[in-house]
Amino acid sequence: MIAYEGFQGRVGRTIAGSESWWPERATPPPGSPNVVIVLVDDVGFADLGCYGSEIPTPHLDALAARGTQWTDFHTTPMCSPTRAALLTGMNPHLAGVGHIANSDPGFPGYAGEIDPRIPTMAEIFREHGWHTLAVGKWHLTKDSDMSDAGPRHAWPLQRGFDRFYGFLDAFTNFHHPHRLISDNSAVEVDGYPDGYYLTDDLTSRATTMIRQARASDDRPFLLYLAHGAAHAPLQAPEADISAFRGAYGQGWDAIRLQRHSRQKELGLHTFDLPPRNHEEGDAVQPWDDLTAAQKTVFARYMEVYAAMITGIDRSVGELTATLEDLGELDNTIFVFTSDNGASREGEEHGTTQYLRTLLSSNSRHDREDPAADLDRLDLIGGPRTLAHYPRGWAMASNTPFRLYKRNTHQGGHAVPFLMSWPDGLPDTGKVDTWAYVTDVLPTLLELTGLPERELNGRSMTRTGEREQYSELQGHRGYVKGDWEIVTRHAPLTPFGDHEWELYHRPTDRTQLHDLAAERPELVAELAKAWEEAARANQVYPLDEGSRLRYLIRPPWHEDAAPVRLTPYVHTLERWRSLQLIQWRSFTVTATIAEPGDGVLVAHGGQGGGYVLHIEDGEVVFTQNGYGVMHHLKAGPSGTTIEAHITAPGDWAWNVTIEVDGERRATHEGLPMLAAFCPMEGIDVGVDRRSPVSWEHGQNPFTGRIKDVLYTPGAFAPDAGANFVDLVRQVGMRFE
């Protein structure tokens, strides 16, 4: 560095004899608008009142009434890719996020984080003088980078936000969030107060940040509020759920018809309603064919989902009231949308244990238990269940479109989009122009007067023919003007032009009449365009469905080594904790310095986990197997307590307890916890937040624990890590 380099004043011997100079600081032009973006999760096209829903959403309806309501707006079919596209204006694969940020197979389009060379919306606006605030779900950081050790290069503050409060993961418990982040650090909380609800907490944090920013100076702000709702688990305050008690006994077929009728009355479209989804693996049962018990529990799931939409609407109302109180509402560009269509992840029957169902849907073991779900009817929506609705309700949420989140058919990506700016945009009512999530950033740059950038999207104020590719998990799509081709790709089947369906969008947006056989030359033209776009946007390699993408990890992901934990260490982060136990044998050794009762070590919560504890002087190992409790008692306590968990294969665990070297008790055939389970990380001396055992709660240890040692062992014989080469060979058949 050269002394005084770039200084444009004059330096004498004294301050009095010198001439001052300051570098220019980015300052937005006077009157520049604030920007508020509310992104919700897994909310379908038909879930808001202004889009035909029976769920009252007065605040969102008011937002639509004072601004513009798009009826042909599209995202990607999944959360992380949409977030990357929204925040960069770039196609998701080109931004590095072609899939969720929970795998990193080593290809540019699937890095699980935004390419560091691509600036985010926050970086652009901060560079030009805006406050930049983020609240809620992030899901743009590799799961392996979420621990307290980082690295933090892909955390919100490192990607342009001045403030952040929320969670980095794909989802969390709304009553007991497993790990909240404030700015760059984990919030160390042992438990949440009665009545706590994440959606309300995020809203409160967002309004507080706005008020703090406005009290500090008059610069405009950018607020990105990304709600976890209405992603599973379906949970809501009891008062909100009660408001919908009995509202859904008529079933998804009737609700879907009613929503479709209202949509036409509202002038949203004139399209026919397709038959209920019938494709293999995606099919929905007729409501009238269900048993009385099924109807009872399925209706309860939807009551909770509707309550979550109520919470979202309340959030928008509180944001609006805050802006109005500050005199900022008229000069705020307010955007509301969803990250993808409604989710089918509750599969055919729904679930009270979402982590169990995620595992069942991705393995040959079906652990679903509809009878147990019915037994938990009165718990659905509360902190003791992690519920999700059956895909029949997702079909209704996506009315009038086919299929669901993950699909490149309309139901996967046609979503609500509202935008209002009273001072700068006229109330234009409904707009039926095709628009895509990459268009949001260039639109905001134009409206705020910031310099235009080279982006994949373009301002939504422009008209003209559009072209856009889509891809997720092998499903493909391409839109060009009035025409659209799309595939519904089955895993481990050949890719090819034989999969393409062809639809004429102006007359058949609900994709009822496949014209591929009638117009093969047009299919070929659009398929060629998709291939060119795929190469240009680093979409390849495609996911052939072998699940190899989840087995390949970077070289710095070395196999887990033993970890020593003490009571002075707060919760070990979820992903780091999972590496010590997942798909493998492991040993937990707790050394007691002073005897007592309570938790020695706990890992997990109400969605699944295990806890080693002392109860009235007796050693007990308790497993929560996706809601089913197992207890193994091992006699009087001692100084050294060891739980040896072996993984013999077939998705099972065997547990042996030793006390001071003496073998005391064994339990074989416990369900292995895997995938996202346990969701809570490891705690020593207390079971924080959502407890493994609701009966025992936090149950802090009354004595003193010296330490707890985790020693990871061999992988189960049938663990994927043992078959990477074989899985690759299976996938190679479709190269």
Image (spheres, grey):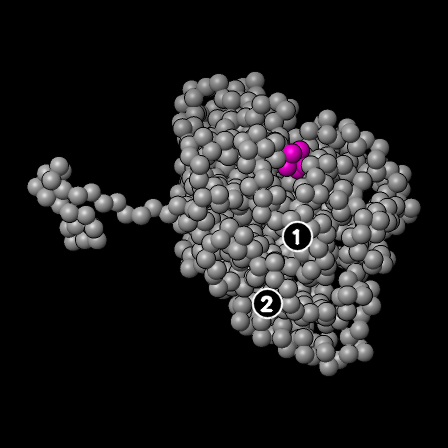
Q: Indicate which disc residue 596 carries.
A: none
Viewer-nearest of discs 2 and 1: 1
Tally of marks? 2
Please tell me how crowded label 1 is: few (under 14), some (14-19), or many (20+) other residues with Cα within 10 Å: many
Please indicate, yes or no, whether residue 380 appears anywhere in the rendered image. yes
* Picture residue at 80% right of the left edge, 77% below the top: 517
- Which of marks 1 and 2 precedes in the sequence? 1
State the residue lying farthest toward the left. Answer: 13
Q: Residue at x 77, y 56 (%)?
A: 401
* The residue stretch that appears in magenta: 312-317
| Picture quadrant where residue 410 is located | bottom right
Q: Residue at x 66, y 75 (%)?
A: 527
Q: Secondary structure at mark 2?
A: loop
**Position in image of residue 248 (x %, y %):** 84, 38
**Which of the two residues, 309 or 546, is positioned nearer the viewer here?**
309
The x and y percentages for residue 687 are: 54, 28
Q: Position of residue 278 (x, y in %)?
A: 83, 58
Q: Which residue is mark 2?
A: 542
Residue 340 has which mark?
A: 1
Label 2: few (<14), some (14–19) or many (≥20) C-alpha neighbours in 10 Å: some
Q: Is residue 464 left or right of residue 132?
A: right
From the viewer's side, name the closer residue of 492 and 123. Answer: 123
| Residue type marked 2 | Leu
Quadrant where the C terminus sits is bottom right
